[in-house]
Image: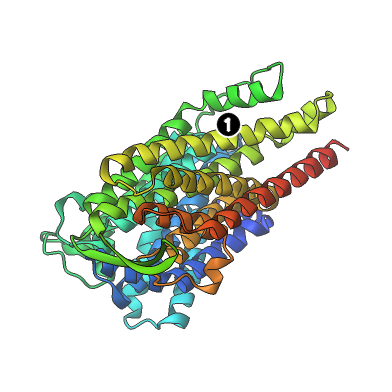
Amino acid sequence: MTTTGLLVRRYVSETARNRVTVSMLVVVPVVFVAVAAQKIADAAELLGGQGGVAVETATAGWAAAFVSAIAMYFQVRSARATDRRLVLAGLASVRLVAARLATGLALAVTATAAALVTLAARTGISVPGRTIAGTLMFAVIYLGIGALIGALVPEPVNGTVLVFFVWILDVFFGPAFGAADRVVTRPLPTHFAALWMMDLPSRHGGRIGDLGWALVWTVAALAVSWAVVAATSRAARPRRPAGQLATALRMGLREAGRNRVLWALLIAVPTAFILLAAVSTPDEYQSMVLTENGRRAVVRFWFPDAHPGFMAPVSIATLAALVGLFTALQARSGDQRLFLAGLRVRSLLTARLSVVALGALVATAASLAVTAALFDPRQWGLYLLANLLMGLTYGLIGVLIGSFVGRVGGVFVAFLVPFLDIGIEQSPMLNSEVSGVGRTLPGYGASRVLYDAALTGSFDETGPLLIALAWLAGLTIAAALLFRHAVRTTAV
């Protein structure tokens, strides 16, 4: 076996040892295509896009793209020191880079296959060649994006948020959700791949056409991946030493304060997301069944005004979940040492949950600052409370995810759960009534309070508010018990 082949085998074996990562490469595309495809197609049609089977087909590409980007991001981040040692030991850089890229392509093919099998089982594939090639191009393009972000952004929470941000812009402001000839969307990574995959000629592809530009993006992504892996294997950045502080609370907040990129992303991501949602909303009225003054009534509202207010909780919940996830993961070893040094578990827990709450507060404040300029809810206080409940709830869910799943799989879950819960199941645009499944999800109570506060002048959702508070209390207790168990178990 050649050196490159041996490296590929070792890299794949190393990845396969993490069963959670391997399962997420399959589970996330399957769940996304099986559960969200129809709802996304409905949302695309509602927002003036294509809708129908074409958009459902594109969900396979979007699922494979997101999974590929996250997998490549963590491969680049985790392999930096190891790859550098291999090159210093005499391994040719070209062989190492080829092995890393082959491993990344293997992960992309796995995610692509899972998405396509699910799509075939759900709706069938009418044009197999176009669908398979399009989905694979999506995955390869996002391999390059994941590699580039992995080289530039060392902090995992910042990197995954940035991947999520690029993916959100690409999907929800691409040709599937709006006019195919919009000039502003043409630089998006999968603009031409999506048009070709959905068989929607753009008529602005020039001589090489949509397929030609899609292939250019694909080849460029491979070139970027090659250059990034080659560059990161030549040098390693020194790790920043952790500060020593007198108390766990001050230590946690000081450590979080050093991560300036995170706080910038917590502000920039919801701001851009809400603003772009506002400008892409079609000019039309929508209706929603709500309770007002104790009676069920159909509330009619101007969609462009209300849509930014409905999008705010989606970004808040997702960002809060990611903050909770990485706060739990990055603090494990440090908390063990502090516990052995005599610091009480209660102080450690307070410090970690304070950081999670601070992240939720920053994301909520940034989202509502932008929302206030575009949307005026009928009951501002309750609207603020509902968004804050959403952020705190999903911040705690992120902590629990980090305790059970781990870094790579945790990112998939932290992205998928709030998207399916708040963005799909609780959405008034996609569901006239909340389904039985939707009522069991964490976002149900806070969502009902949010829509009541946004569109009615009286508060009639006491029951859902109590449900939201119960979720918050239960998740806090669960996080405390898991934290206590993890610290004391590892310490022993």
Give the left or right position of residue 482, taking residue 11 as reference.
Answer: right
**Is any atom of residue 239 visible in this view?**
no
Image quarter hosting the N terminus: bottom right
Give the left or right position of residue 350, taking residue 383 as reference.
Answer: right
Label 1 is placed on what type of residue? Answer: Leu
Residue for point 59% across, 66% down: 440
Residue for point 27% across, 67% down: 46
- The image position of residue 247, as x and y in percent, is 71, 20
Colour mode of the rendering: rainbow
Which residue occupies the extreme right position in the image? 492
Residue for point 50% across, 43% down: 388
Disc 1 on helix, strand or loop?
A: helix
- The image position of residue 253, as x and y in percent, is 59, 25
CA neighbours of label 1 inside 10 A, class few (<14), some (14 to 19), many (20+): some
Which of the 4 image quadrants contains residue 24? Answer: bottom right
The vertical placement of 441 against 97, above or below, is below
Q: Name the residue under label 1.
A: 88
Depth check: 335 or 205 in front?
A: 335
Give the left or right position of residue 463, taking residue 105 as reference.
Answer: right
The vertical placement of 438 against 9, above or below, is below
Depth check: 157 or 462 in front?
A: 462
- Report the number of discs: 1
